[in-house]
Image: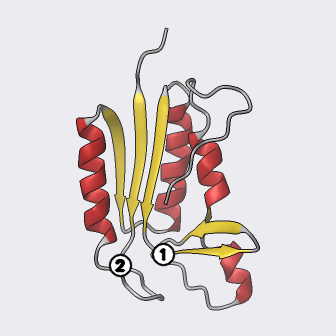
């Protein structure tokens, strides 16, 4: 029987150190987190997350999603696409060299894999992605 447990990781990055700052993402993330809580989600909110904070949030989401019926990830901030793969940019990314592009951001593929481990997902079903 489904427990109806719902988990969410919400990240809003705006206070970037080496790339242009964004004024809205932390506020947007706060609004999304509040809306998800009203819908019964257990929400982890990360405002202006650095690489380690984002990585720890994803690891915790993967652990929490294991027994959940639904997992949601919301990200507002800078992102980039390289050779068909999408990346989320932490606030401490410097991106000074080409090689930094695969070492400093967080792969969206990793995010999708972490959130796909819910009990509500069936084998072979791909997680949904919106932007």
- Crowd rating for badge 2 (residues with CA inside 10 Å; few <14, some 14–19, many 20+): many
Numbered label attached to residue 15: 2
Against 105, residue 8 (above or below) is above
Q: How far apart are the alpha carbons under marks 1 and 2?
A: 10 Å
Q: Is residue 75 left or right of residue 45?
A: right
Query: Relative to the observer, which residue lies in front, 44 or 25?
Result: 25
* Cβ atoms at labels 1 and 2 below 8 Å apart: no
Q: Position of residue 15 (x, y in %)?
A: 35, 78
Residue at 64 percent across and 67 percent down: it is 86
Query: Relative to the observer, which residue lies in front, 48 or 127?
Result: 127
The image quarter containing residue 79 is bottom right
Secondary structure category for the residue under label 2: loop
Q: Is residue 85 left or right of residue 63?
A: right
Q: Position of residue 32 (x, y in %)?
A: 30, 52
The image quarter containing residue 49 is bottom left
Query: Relative to the observer, which residue lies in front, 2 or 11?
Result: 2
Secondary structure category for the residue under label 1: loop
- Crowd rating for badge 1 (residues with CA inside 10 Å; few <14, some 14–19, many 20+): many
Against 9, residue 94 (above or below) is below
Residue at 49 percent across and 27 percent down: it is 68
Q: Position of residue 121 (x, y in %)?
A: 60, 28
Residue at 56 percent across and 46 percent down: it is 59
Which residue is disc 1 drawn over? 78
Residue at 41 percent across and 31 percent down: it is 6
Q: Is residue 12 left or right of residue 57?
A: left
Q: How many marks?
A: 2
């Amino acid at each position: 029987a489904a427990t109806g447990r719902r988990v969410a990781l919400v990240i809003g990055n705006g206070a970037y150190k080496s790339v242009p700052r964004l004024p809205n993402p932390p506020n947007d993330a706060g609004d999304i987190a509040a809306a998800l809580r009203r819908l019964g989600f257990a929400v982890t909110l990360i405002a202006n997350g650095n690489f380690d904070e984002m990585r720890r949030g994803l690891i915790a989401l993967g652990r929490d999603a294991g027994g959940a019926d639904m997992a949601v990830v919301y990200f507002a901030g800078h992102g980039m696409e390289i050779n068909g793969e999408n990346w989320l940019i932490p606030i401490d990314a410097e991106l000074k060299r080409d090689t930094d592009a695969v070492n400093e951001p967080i792969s969206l593929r990793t995010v999708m894999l972490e959130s796909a481990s819910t009990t509500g997902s069936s084998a072979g079903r791909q997680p949904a992605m919106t932007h």
